[in-house]
Image: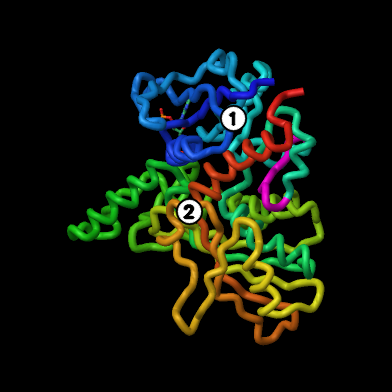
Amino acid sequence: MSTQYRVAVVGATGAVGTKMIEMLEQTSLPLAEVKLLASKRSAGKTLNFNGQELVVEELVPESFEGIDLALFSAGGGISKKFAPEAVKRGAVVVDNTSYFRMDPEVPLVVPEVNKEALHQHKGIIANPNCSTIQMMVALEPIRQAAGLDRIIVSTYQAVSGAGAQAMEELKRETLSYLDGTPANELNPEILPSGGDKKHYPISFNALPQIDVFAEDDYTYEEWKMINETHKIMDDQAIKVAATCVRIPVFSGHSESVYIETKEKTDVAAIKALLEKAPGVVLEDDPSNQIYPQALNSIGKKETFVGRIRRDLDVENGFHMWVVSDNLLKGAAWNSVQIAETLHEMDLLRVE
Ligand code: A2P
């Protein structure tokens, strides 16, 4: 086993990939080499890593020769095709796409919640959906203490979750609208979902569609929150409903989360738990207008929780506001944190 790891970032030029590079600059993992991979279009470009200019290479199966760890964020199709190529060559893959998440052979991990699942890995570990991760970090301490019967979540998600081009689309539409272009002439091309037929402006708008529609008229993003919660918490009985909404924010996902606990608890007990929970920052002081905000979460690895209130009608019902940087804890940081945890558990290798 290497004592220093050779790491590849797949999708290094993307919204998440560039953050993966930043997280690798800060990691406690001993690194021997960082290799940046993207499409042919980006081959030859350079990106900075710890003051060094690294040349981006075109992704091919042979890119993984000699690689110990591969962080993927280049879309599900790329993970489907290339993650097995990486594992075949001895690399452990941490995949940020949804492609392997529900595969029973693949652990789906939020280190604060279920790092023990890493023992089961066979080369690929899936990084959960960004909205799911921050909700899990906030709710796991409450589940441990009082059980969780039901979750109802509404999300307010940033455009960076849809990639670098979606961020450009928000910027272009905003400038264009402020310049006097009418809403029906903004020519959206990506959002709400690059894979769907119609596109709507995101600037000055709120779109109740993330990913395409699926069973029971829930979107895939909503199904991801439901199914991934069950898998990560290893409990199919938790009732989960989600409404996922894209809003014109560049980064930082916000969520209004309603829960019903199995056992009796109260707001003070929940606050006390979250105050010392790993990865959580409690920001909850209404008298001083202190609560989590998307803008303040940018660049931070933690999940911020506030506005914790009892429901006025349901005895074990509670409401809260949960915010995190979707590109960091929701993606790049959780992936690198999984790699650090694998290293600590002596599991950063393919058996
Ligand atoms: P490229 O910049 O060369 O297109 P985002 O999620 O921000 O849209 O980024 C997607 C990432 O996935 C980018 O780094 C992009 O590289 C990469 N990517 C897209 N298609 C491919 C491909 N066919 N092979 C390798 N990387 C790809």
What residue sits 49% from the left and 25% below the top? Answer: 34
Badge 1: residue crowd in 10 Å (few <14, some 14–19, many ≥20): many
- Looking at the image, residue 184 sits to the left or right of residue 65; the answer is left
Tell whether position 109 is magenta: yes
Q: Position of residue 303 (x, y in %)?
A: 56, 59
User: In 3D space, how far apart are the residues under numbered discs 1 and 2 (Cα atoms)?
Assistant: 27 Å
Residue 220 lies, with reference to residue 42, above or below; the image says below
Q: Position of residue 278 (x, y in %)?
A: 64, 57
Tell whether position 227 is magenta: no
**Callout 2: helix, strand or loop?**
loop
| Residue, disc 1 | 79
> Residue flagged by tag 1: what amino acid is it?
Ser
Q: Nearer the viewer, residue 251 or 178?
A: 251
- Judged from the image, the quadrant occupied by ligand 1 is top left
What residue sits 77% from the left and 63% below the top? Answer: 144
Q: Nearer the viewer, residue 272 or 127?
A: 272
Q: Quadrant of the N terminus?
A: top right
Residue 60 lies, with reference to residue 215, above or below; the image says above
| Residue, disc 2 | 300
The rendered magenta stretch, by its main secondary structure, is classed as loop
- Looking at the image, residue 288 sits to the left or right of residue 109; the answer is left
Q: Nearer the viewer, residue 220 or 319?
A: 319
**Callout 1: helix, strand or loop?**
helix
Mark 1 or mark 2, which has the lower sequence index?
1
Q: Nearer the viewer, residue 94 or 53?
A: 53
What residue sits 44% from the left and 79% below the top? Answer: 289
Residue 92 lies, with reference to residue 175, above or below; the image says above
